[in-house]
Image (tube, rainbow, N blue to C red):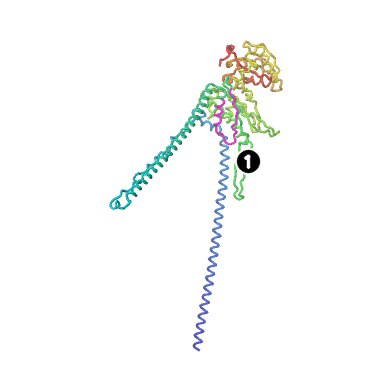
Amino acid sequence: MARRTGLAATLGQIERNAAMRRADQVKAQAAAQREAERARKAFERASAADEKERRRLYLESRSADVDAMNEAVEGQVAALESLLAATLEVDHYLDLDALKVRPDIRPYDPGPLAVPEPPPDPLRFQIPPLTGGKKLVPGAKDKHAAAEQDAARGYHAAVAAHSAREEQRIARWRSEYEAHEVRKAALVADAEKRNKEIDAFRAEFMASDPDAVVSYFDLVLQRSAYPEGFPQKYRLAFVPESKQLVVEYQLPTANVVPAVKAYKFVKTKDDVTTTARPATSIKALYASAIVQVALRTLHEIFESDRSGKIDTVVLNCVVDTVDPAVGKPIRPVLLTVRTTRSVFSELDLSQVEPVACLRHLGAGVSKSPSELAPVRPVLEFDMVDKRFIQETDVLSGLDQRPNLMELSPSEFENLITNLFAKMGLETRLTQASRDGGVDCVAFDPRPIFGGKVVIQAKRYKGTVGVSAVRDLYGTVHNEGASKGILVTTSGYGSASFEFANGKPLELLAGSNLLFLLSEYAGIEARIEPPVDWVDPAGAEMA
């Protein structure tokens, strides 16, 4: 009985222990589940925080991109507003010596080839002498003598191989040095050739060679740094008899003004919206850019001309685009101006208001540049006959072309009369003047723009004086004419252009006359005063 009681007690203890273990396991499992849930929630919180941080960084990057886009737009507008101011900080003089080449020729460096190889050491080939009992060994002396002979042969072979290698080293050194000298001579020759060309160019420029003058100012305008979107294309012509540079400068279209005023990032939609620039703002910015380009170009030309090759500049600013109405190419002139060095030098461009300044210079400016409303150019670029200006020597040998300076006064009168008749005017000759030119009264039949025109022609070799321009202006008033035209076989000085500025006067030089004769009368003429030609009184000799 006692034995059964003890057994039962033992079994009960075992069951209690098992229950306790099961309870501990349940507790452990519950704790593990709670820890897993805590870890899961911590992970979810961390993931959410990471996503939030990633979102924050993404939105910051998008916002920064939009800020950069706004800064770019503001920079474009600022560049357009400061076109004139930007050029005033630059010295536009072109130092031709700076174009010369100074070849960077370094001394020849032979490197390892300059280090001779040490000659063979004879001690390495020396056979130790026989000593002591070795001398008594039979045949030892013969073997020793043979070894010495082998060593001597080895030494001589090593010396020969060393000499051969040294000859090769010296030959390579000499070859590389000669190649270096050839390259050096070629660099020096190329530099000398280029520098001679620059010296020749300078001499031609100082001699007022038309090609050289045009090339010089082409280089000047090439160096002018404009914002992106400006074509920087132009045509240049030089009229040596009047020291007049004619420039046709290509403007950008109104698209150079940013159409967007501002960008905005909408975070809630993750989207970028734009605010359009008002049409009035685009028109104003474009008009401002045009007048600044004109003043800038005139400034760069006159400032770079330290040798005084140019007295007068005619500038036509054109746009090469497509007419939106008909879809065909057009090149309207949006701004035209003629000014002289003396007048332009009186300006303080850092203080002027560009539109008022151009009005002071008598410029013609489009009333609506963005709509490509054209103005009549002061001087058509194509009227500057390139053949006459730049190929005088060639034309002088073409005797089949009539020389205007050899025509009689009556022939010259008829020539001018026929020319303007071909151009659409109703001409009437007057009595020839004492200087051999012709005074002609013509009528422009066009309504509104037409009227009476007084034409005077002077066959001069030297520059036409400003007094002739004043006389023509007086004749225009006395005749009640709407316009006066002065035609000469030579050219005009800056004083003439200054006086004619803003007045109903047209001054046509010899190059213009040749162009008009070719274009309207089909006459390929030339202008070559005889050696003994004497200009009439009143001409200012060139």
Q: Secondary structure at mark 1?
A: strand
Q: Does the magenta-highlighted stretch encompass residue 125?
A: no
Taking the magenta stretch, the answer to whether it contains residue 217 is yes
Report x, y in % for residue 30.
54, 69
Most foreground residue, 237 or 161: 161
Q: Residue at image x 60%, y 14%?
A: 529
Where is 222 relative to 516, above or below?
below
Q: Nearer the viewer, residue 325 or 242?
A: 242
Give coordinates of residue 125: x percent, y percent: 35, 46
Residue at left offset 51%, top offset 80%: 14
Q: Quadrant of residue 112?
A: top left
Name the side, left or right, on which 229 lies relative to 129.
right
Which quadrant does the C terminus fall into?
Answer: top right
Can you see residue 486? no
Task: Say whether residue 398 is visible.
Answer: yes
Q: Residue furthest bottom?
A: 1
The magenta-colored residue range is 213-238
Q: Looking at the image, which residue sits at the far front?
A: 138
- In the image, 398: left or right of 27? right
Query: Looking at the picture, does residue 51 appear above or below residue 429?
Result: below
**Nearer the observer, 284 or 23:** 23
Q: Return the residue at label 1.
A: 276
What amino acid type should be assigned to the residue bearing mark 1? Ala
Foreground pick, 394 / 540: 394
Check disc 1: other Cα within 10 Å, few if <14, some if 14-19, many if 20+.
Answer: few
Q: Position of residue 474 (x, y in %)?
A: 62, 15
Estimate the x, y position of residue 277 in percent, counting from the top left. 62, 39
Location of residue 149 (image quadrant):
top left
